[in-house]
Image (spheres, rainbow, N blue to C red):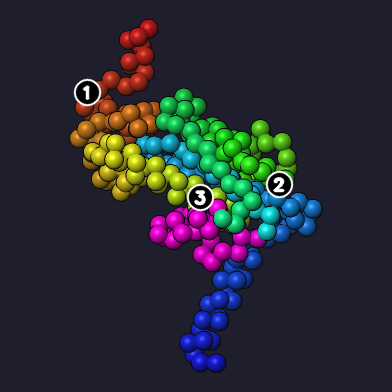
Amino acid sequence: MTAKQRKAKATYERERRRLHRLHRFEYAARERGFTLVGGIDEVGRGPLAGPVVAACVVAAQPLLIKGLNDSKQVRPELRVELAEIIKSRAIAWAIGSACVAEIDRLNIYWASVLAMERAIAALAAVPEYLITDAVRIRSFGGPQEPLVHGDARCAVVAAASIVAKVHRDALMVELDREEPRYGFALHKGYSTPVHLAALRTHGPSVHHRANWARVRDAQLALGLQTLEALEAVGE
């Protein structure tokens, strides 16, 4: 075996071991008799604009996919490739979302839960056992395991995080075509210097989360009325 072949084999073995460690919670669930193990995660809690999006992925077999990881640890080009592989290997997958108005009305935590509930409701096959990223979904009737940092520790949750991230990124690219002043395609609604500068220049759009401090600050700086002020006038 050449040095190059030894290096390739060592790389393969490291990735194989990593993927098996990433499946330890699924393996434990299957040892308890559950076959259809679901993972659910959301993306978009932190941005100043756009929806919060959740994905649920249900698998009957281990998702031993090279590169599978928490979506934040995967480069964008690979995320798109992995999302398609995940969808092709999963028994079922679905997307749910909560819009900006729902985020402002409910708060981001409960809007995230709503997005997750919608993702579960849209599934073609319901998981027998659900692993979440540290959230308990009360409306789910089966056994579930809220796992802190689940997207980094559990394969099926990592898969859900990738599917959700790719879907939301595509939505933000579409919003950028509708409203190009803010650069949504570049920053996906997060509070980058480019986004904050656009907010200061143009004020918030209908796609911004009106109750968020930096969005409110931009409104006030331009002399625009906040949502609460407009509602008070209506009363």
Label 1, on which residue?
Answer: 223
The kind of residue tagged 3 is Val
Q: Which residues are magenta?
A: 62-87
Amino acid marked by disc 1: Gly
Residue drawn at the location 54% of the way across and 66% of the way down: 66
Mark 1, other Cα within 10 Å: few <14 / some 14–19 / many ≥20: few
Dot in front, 3 or 2? 3
Sooner in the amino-acid sequence: mark 3 or mark 2 = 2
- Residue contact between numbered discs 3 and 2, judged by CB atoms under 8 Å: no
Left or right for 163, reference 23: left
Secondary structure found at label 1 = loop
Q: Position of residue 225 (x, y in %)?
A: 28, 20
Look at mark 2 in the image and give the residue it sits on.
129
Disc 3, SS: helix
The residue that appears at 44% across and 31% down in the rendered structure is 99
Q: Which mark is residue 30?
A: none
Earlier residue among tags 2 and 1? 2
Crowding near the residue tagged with mark 3, few <14, some 14–19, many ≥20 C-alpha atoms within 10 Å: many
Residue type marked 2: Tyr
In this rendering, the count of numbered labels is: 3
In the image, residue 125 sits, relative to residue 70, either above or below, namely above
Residue at 50%, 27% (x, y): give it: 106
On the image, which quarter does residue 158 sit in? bottom right
Q: Is residue 44 magenta?
A: no
Q: Residues within 10 Å of mark 2 (few under 14, many from 20)?
A: many
User: According to the image, label 3 marks what residue?
Assistant: 163
Q: Are marks 1 and 3 in contact (CB under 8 Å)?
A: no
Q: Is residue 66 magenta?
A: yes
| Residue shown at 55% from the left, 81% from the top | 10
Q: Secondary structure at mark 2?
A: strand
Q: Quadrant of the N terminus?
A: bottom right
